[in-house]
Image (cartoon, grey):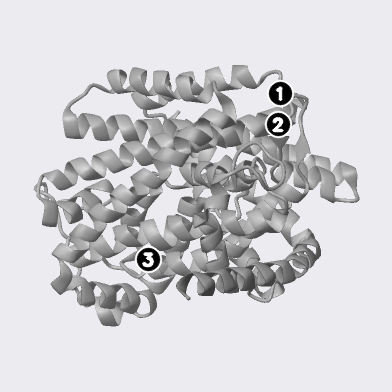
Amino acid sequence: MERVNEIVGAIDSFVWGPVMLVLLVGTGIFLTIRLKFLPWRNLGYALHSVLSKEARTTKRGTGDVSPFSALMTALAATIGTGNIIGVATAMFSGGPGALVWMWISACFGLTSKFSECMLAIKYREVNEKGEMSGGPMYTMKNAFKNKSFGKTLGFLFALFSVLASFGIGNMTQANSISGSVKEAFGIPVWVTGIILTVLALMIILGGITSISKVSSVVVPGMAVFYVIAGLIVIIGNYQNVPHGLYLIFGMALNPKAVGGGVLGTITVSVMNSIRYGVARGVFSNEAGLGSAAITAAAATTDDPVRQGYINMTGTFFDTIVVCSITGIAIAASGVLGTTNASGEPLQGVQLTVAAFESVLGPVGKYLVTIGIILFAFSTILGWEYHGEKAFEYLFQSHTFNVIYRVVFSLVVFIGATQTLDLVWNISDIMNALMAIPNLICMLLLNNVIAKEVDRYQPILEKERKAYKTAKKKKTA
């Protein structure tokens, strides 16, 4: 069994290695240039659209949930333990400079997220129940002239999505929660497992409507809670913030010149900084993997480009906002490179806890634990919907969705009570393999994406102008 674990671990390292990261970021770079940087130029419009009252209604167009709810459900799946533990891991393994590469990958990830979500809405279908069904698998099935090629790609994406949903989107999250709760509050993992399973079952059985309702409350709430706590830590260490930022930017490009033993146990290279920054960034915001596009397809909208812009802000909120809070808090607190009582270097969640405790004392540990609980549980909910829609695609029917919901909820208990490295590594591989058909799809449909963006730009400009005029009238 140990040998199998080693082999699967080696495959996992390979599929998430330099080739995959170059493909993910490279696709983002190509599409950003192909779209004349319009997703970047229209980020302000996208953020305004998300925060508008209209985004919370279902008045414009057709769909299952409001544009805001669709975004929050997608964010529920992406804002997870990666924002707390993943950032700390990247900064330990790749140095503080990894945060810069996380930001850079997120900038190009904006375009990837926009493209996959826009295509998902353009090519979505309505199932027998009258619900929206969409995502990269439907894009592949409906957009390609070569139907057998499209269906094959779609089948592979859906299969990898279902397998990944049980590991990355379920067991690893449940295990993070039960482990954190046991360490912070001393509650046995089986008790946490039962509570999580019951809660998951209650919410998940209600389908997308129930999941989106919970996500629309939990996701903004938990993000604001964590950001405020993080800002308190950063303000509490305000004297060290300039030096922390110097380390972040300096060590992204020239770690040896800047580091010089300042960080004790941390020794990094530029390549390591890039590798861990990009990898953890992609893990965190899932841009290019295609998962968020499944949820985007449920949105009520009159135009695929409009919702594409709304959904791409998920990458901004996830990486540029939440990950930055964790990263700057760690850099400013001076805990990076320090050791624990056993003389081992602080890494992962220990690093984030130490950063929060530097200002908040023992309360910091509990705040980070609460953050992990909320972030990880919301990921379970978001990923259930991703997996369910992929499951529906594989069977070409929604009839078995209830079975998937029940099994998915019960697997939460297994995840909370068992550490199954083999299962996690396999699902990690499936997560990476999801990206391959999705990236092929976006690259082959780049002309379609560009045409849609160009078509929508005059509409966007008209709306922007109308908003400015209305604002002037209010202030007049």
Query: How many residues crowd around disc 3 within 10 Å: few (fewer than 14), some, or many (20 or more)?
Result: many
CB of mark 1 within 8 Å of CB of mark 3?
no
Q: CA distance from mark 1 to mark 2?
A: 9 Å
Q: Which mark is residue 380?
A: none
Residue that appears at 73% across and 24% down: 129
Give the image location of residue 124, x and y in percent. 75, 42
Q: Which residue is mark 3?
A: 99
Q: Which mark is residue 398?
A: 1
The answer to whether marks 1 and 2 mark residues whose Cβ atoms lie closer than 8 Å is: yes
Q: Earlier in the sequence, mark 1 or mark 2?
A: 2
| Location of mark 2 (residue) | 131
2 or 3: mark nearer the eye: 2
Q: Amino acid under label 3?
A: Leu
* Residue 336 higher or lower than 157, as above or below: below
Name the N-terminal-most of marks 1 and 3.
3
Q: For numbered disc 3, what is the local secondary structure?
A: helix
